Amino acid sequence: MIVSNIIEGNFVERPNRFTVVFKTNEGLNNGQMLEKAHLRDPGRLKELLLPDVALLLRPALNPDHRKTKYDVVAVKKDDFWVLINSGFHSDIAQDLIESGRIGEFSNYSVERREYTYGKSRIDFLLSDDNNGRMLVEVKGCTLVEDRLARFPDAPTTRGKKHVEELTRAVGEGLKSAVLFLVLSEDACRFTPNRVTDPEFSQALEIAHERGVSVVPYSFKNIYTGDKLEIKPFKRIKLEL
């Protein structure tokens, strides 16, 4: 997946959950140095949004109907980029599911996105002529420390509810999976974040025990001038 029309900036502050103030490169917007951008990531991101850290952003597609002119796309960590925009998750996931890279999804195709099951809206309903249907919920993971990816970085009652719905689906004879998009290339292992959200972590462990597939997959984000290419990197080890 390629995200075009990228500009660079530097993080200044995060006044609220969905807004970032950033410093533009010299000369952008007739010399105006500070701008606001929409941050489409519910996580805390404290280990990533450090003072003056480099950001990748793109101009909003509908600036006349918004308070912010830009969207945050990625943040620099060491010498690589971490995607911090959940608006791309579904497209990234669909490309990965249909790529044939993941055994659990082999021969499946996307029948429907945003599929209502029980009291939840699940990201994907997959279908295969031989193996029937599968529900897939997608979660984006950005917290990686010492090569260990952990999800979530903030409590998520919604995430717990989704996992419980998938567990129920398996009990009713429907295959299901949680696909964790680890949006950073430095992870080798994945585990639920038991300290931050023990309830979600327990729900995920129970789901796995009862037959829900848990698939963590990492990505490289390659920045070249005005484009960011989001490339599947590798499946990483699951530790439950």
Image: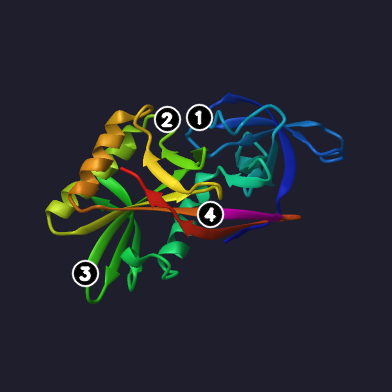
> In the drawing, what numbered circle is on residue 132?
3
Q: How is the image coloured?
A: rainbow
- Name, please, the residue furthest toward the bottom: 129
* Mark pair 1, 3: CA separation: 38 Å
Kind of element beneath mark 2 = loop
Q: Are marks 2 and 1 in contact (CB under 8 Å)?
A: yes
* Mark pair 4, 1: CA separation: 20 Å
Query: In the image, which is nearer the foreground, mark 4 or mark 2?
Result: 4
Comes first in the chain, label 2 or label 3: 3
**Quarter holding residue 3:** bottom right
> In the drawing, what numbered circle is on residue 222?
none
Disc 2 target residue: 154
Magenta span covers which residues?
219-223
Going by the numbered disc 4, the residue's amino acid type is Phe
Kind of element beneath mark 4 = strand
Q: Are marks 4 and 3 in contact (CB under 8 Å)?
A: no
* Mark pair 4, 2: CA separation: 21 Å
Q: Give left or right: position of 209 versus 56.
A: left
Disc 4 target residue: 219
Query: In the image, which is nearer the foreground, mark 4 or mark 3?
Result: 4
Q: Residue at x 42, y 30 (%)?
A: 154
Q: Residue at x 59, y 31 (%)?
A: 19
